[in-house]
Structure formats: structure tokens, C-alpha cells
Image: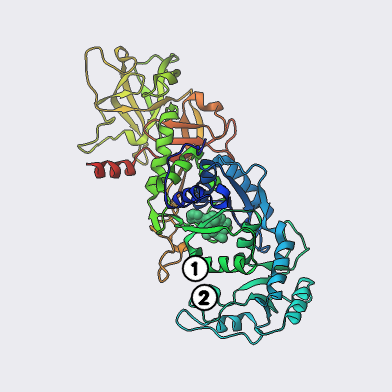
Amino acid sequence: MPSDENSTRSDFIRNIVEDDIKTNKNNGLVSTRFPPEPNGYLHIGHAKSICLNFGIATEKKGTCNLRFDDTNPVKEDAEYVKSIKSDIKWLGFDWKDRLHYTSDYFESLYNYAVELIKKEKAYVCSLGPDDIREYRGTLTEPGKDSPYRNRLVGENLDLFVRMRAGEFEEGEHVLRAKIDMSSPNMNMRDPAIYRIRKAYHHKTGNDWCIYPMYDFSHCLSDSIEGITHSICTLEFEDHRPLYDWILDELNTKCHPRQIEFARLNLSYTVMSKRKLLKLVESNIVNGWDDPRLPTISGMRRRGYTSGSIRNFCERVGVAKRDSMVDLALLEYSIRDDLNTSTPRRLSVLNPLKIIIDNYPEGQEEELEALNHPGDPEMGTRKIPFSRELYIEKDDFMEDPPKKFFRLTPGREVRLRFAYYIKCESVIKDEKTGEVVEVHCTYDPETKGGSSPDGRKVKATMHWVSAAHSVKAEVRLYDRLFNVENPGGDKNGPDFMESINPESLKVLTDCHLEPGLADSSPESMYQFERLGYFCVDSKDSMPGSLVFNRTVSLRDSWAKVANKRKK
Ligand code: ATP
Ligand code: MG
């Protein structure tokens, strides 16, 4: 289970919740919610919020609602609703029967707005968008009252009813809360709470042409659902006075406490849905589930496990100050998870043909290979050996530098689980001079990879039998951006200008050991010396396998962590 009731996790939000339970606030109950707007797929930042909200609910024996914050029909879509539900389930969380939509409350929200008008705490403003902006003032100058601020209750009610009835065009009127145009907090300068939007809504169809603004609908939806702790990200800190003002003015039975925490930022990544949508729409990536994206569905397709994402969110922790998390920490979390559980296999990504001249033609044999060198319980498997093999191109050099210990003319190396082989000669392409075939001899006495006379070799290499191997396409991924904080500098280049042109490398002539022929979608392996790989869930088919590299084996984070320890 993702979070258990006996967890000892602790952070400032959990401390607040714990104190509220102790003082029997909300009768000792805890109710949280995760409120995504269905205008894109979920990303790793959302995962942090999901782990926090569902995690606290589970630990404190409370409940967590899933609420779609669907108040902007122009950008929202049922496809997003579907993907969000499926991603949350996959992450390991369950809202049970607590699935809600802000749109379910449209009638109640409308009635609350009418109540505010009647209390002379809201008015219909007929300034155009530009004037509203100008009247708002700036951070250093107070705003000016709208000429419509003192409209009488009757007139406001009449106009609001007619706004709902569709009598006006978009932008002609808005409903505004009547608070304080000179407040130092810009959010309190008579914010808009309802606007006209003549758009089809994925749930309410054409029932409505006025829609509540986030600040108005969010606090009231929280209150309607009896949320106790409304956890959101830091940019809403300045909205909290408005959150409280609305609930106080309407004297609601339930007044949840809004608590803000720092959003997750990851280096070399963009996280805003607006930016992700742009990458998708401009075909920089292939859809929302492209394995290079930080979306949950992209990461899943890449081979990230839900456990590794939850562990990552826990490692990152919950803080009150914004920070940038190193992408290497995410990679560490997945390696950490896959290392113990993932079976090892031999695969060659860039093949170079090896001919064992003294191995009889037509002969073949099966060798025993460990499924996991660190875990004997994972057992062994048989892999075929024959006269013609493939090794990795990089593992051979005709004219090597000093520190190159792998195969080179005259040198002996070990083939993993097989034999010692020695390079005798090479055959080159006449035109290009490229080595296309390496001729070797093997020592039959070294079966299994050790020599009875104690002869040592400096390299152990992976290989496959050419005739037995299965072909596959392998996709190697690199970070999508080549700067640490793409688009992060307001005066610097746009994030679209920092795209790494080499974020995807497709290798089409890869050779895998034959047992991998029937691997099912999403299954994971460590290809020895190469990294962790998973079968692509969309494009892979029997007879035409496609693997994604989840992550390489090199672990820069572990190195940093070890250095720190020393
Ligand atoms: P984006 O900036 O990606 O569009 P958003 O805040 O508009 O995000 P919502 O669908 O409104 O997206 O987010 C749902 C919940 O997830 C909110 O409570 C929001 O605060 C939280 N959330 C969004 N991004 C992050 C993040 N990077 N780290 C932590 N929580 C996040
Ligand atoms: Mg939002």
C-alpha cells in the first residue's frame, strides 16, 4: 500500500492536521481532496499533491475526495477526465465513492452568488476587460472603484439573472465581489466571481453560459464537501484572504483551512499543463504519454513504476519554500526500485558480428545464465550459444587507447555466462574501412566464464547468438531540454527554444536474447551493462518488439549522495 496508517512521516502540514485532531477541531475528522482541472494530463507535480492528499487521509483515518475543477469549459475535455482517473488509480490511490465535479455544484454556486448580491457584497460590473484591468491599479498604486460598484441590489439581481439567461455577450458584464479596491492584496480588489462564457461544457452541455471563477468556486466546493484541510500550492497563498472572505460572508457551515506548500519543480523539465500542451500540439513529442514527458502516463510508458514515483514524492518531502529538484533524484528512485526486482537479460543494441572460427559450424549449445546476480532465488535461464554472435560495437576497438580493456586484436575477454574468446583478425568494409566482422577463437575449457588455470581477463561483455536472437527496436531517451530551467528566466529564451534535439534516439537493429520474444507490454528487464528497459505499451507487438529505455545504469545521484556521506 502507498501509505499506511502507522506511517511516521512528518512535515508541517501533517503537524497541523495532527494538532487539529488533538484539539478535536472538525470533531477530530480529516477530509482532504485532490482538485485537478481536466485541461491536460497529470504530471509528476500532481503526483506530489496526490500522494500528499490521499496519503494524509489514509494515515489519519480520514477521507480524500477526487474533485474535477471543471469551471472553464473552453479548455476542458472528457478525455482528460478519463486519463486523470486512470493515472490516480495506477498511482495506487482510490477515491472510492467520493468522485465529484465542481459542475455538480453550479446551481448551489449560483445561489451563493445571489446571496452575496443580496448582502450587497457583489455587483454586476459592466466595464470592459481593459477598463477592469486599468481600474485595478498596480502593486504600488491603489485601484479605483468601478462606476457600477454602487448598483442597487435589484438591478444587480436582474442583470445577473439575465446573464444566466444568455442575454449578453461574453465580456459585456461580470459579477464581482465587493471588497476593497485599495487593498494591498490585489486579489481583494473586487475580484470577478462569475463571467460569461458561451461554450459547450463536457458535463453540463449548454445548460450554462456563466461560469464561476476559481476563487469563488473552490472554497465553496471545499465547504460543500466538508473538506477540513484544503491543501494547495504556494501561488494561492495570496488568495487565502479571499478564500476566507467568501466563506465568512456567506457564513457557511463548514469553513475548511487552506494550507499552502511549495510546488514540485524538476530540473530540465517543464511542468505547466499549458507548456506540456504546446509540446504535444506542436508535435515536439508524440502525445501526452510520450516517454520523455513528466506526465504520469508518459513516465508509466517509459517504465517508471508507481512505487518509484511514490517514493520519489516522499523523498522530495513537503516544504514551504519553492525549490528545484534534481532530475537525478527521480532517476535514483526508479533505479532503486528496479534494481532488486528486475530480471537481467543480455541484449545487443548496436551489433557487431563475431565469428568463433574454432567453434564447429552447425553446432549450438545452451548455457546457464543467472536471472539476477544478487538474488539466487530469481533462478537461472538457458541461453543459446553458437558460432556466430553479436557483441556491442563499442566493445571492440581495432586501435584502442591505453585504458580500453575490452575486445581488441590479440586480446582475450570473457563473454558473460559463456567462454573466454580471443580476437584473431578482422574483416573490413572495403569502401569505408569500417570493421564489419571480428574473427575470434574460444577456449572450450572456460565454459561458464572461468578458466581452470586461473587465467584472468579484464573485461566481461554481453552478447547474443546471431541466429537465435530476436530483433527489436529500442528507443533511448534523453532529457527533453538542454537547460536546467527551461523558460524559467523571464528575460531569457522561451522554453520552446531550449529543446534538446537528441532527446530521442531510435535504434532499429537491436538483437535480444530469444527468451524476450514473447515479453508482454510493460514488462521490465535490466539489459546487462545497458540499463533498465520496458516493452512499449503502445507500439510493441509480437514479432515487432519495441523497448523503451527507462533509465541507464549510471547513477550520478548515488555518487553525489555517497560523496556527501564521506
Ligand atoms: P499546471 O501548472 O500544471 O497547469 P495546475 O495547478 O493548473 O497545474 P490543477 O489541475 O489545477 O493544475 O492542479 C491540481 C492540483 O495539483 C492543485 O491542487 C495543484 O496545486 C496541484 N499541483 C499542480 N502542479 C503541482 C506541482 N508542480 N507540485 C505540486 N502540486 C501541484
Ligand atoms: Mg489550477
Mark found first going from the N terminus, 2 or 1: 2
Q: Nearer the viewer, residue 162 or 230?
A: 230
**Residue 186: assigned label:** 2
Name above or below for residue 170 compared with residue 83.
Answer: below
Instruction: Name the side, left or right, on which 258 lies relative to 97.
Output: left
Q: Residues within 10 Å of mark 1 (few under 14, many from 20)?
A: few
For ligand 2, which image quadrant applies?
bottom right
Q: Position of residue 281 (x, y in %)?
A: 58, 58
Q: Locate the C terminus and report the quarter of the image it occupies.
A: top left
Instruction: Name the side, left or right, on which 563 lies relative to 347.
Output: left
Q: Position of residue 307 (x, y in %)?
A: 48, 38
Whether residue 30 is visible here, answered yes or no, is no
Give the amino acid at mark 2.
Met
The reply to whether dot 2 and dot 1 touch (C-beta < 8 Å) is: yes
Residue at horizontal 40 percent and vertical 37 percent from the top: 335
Name above or below for residue 364 compared with residue 175.
Answer: above
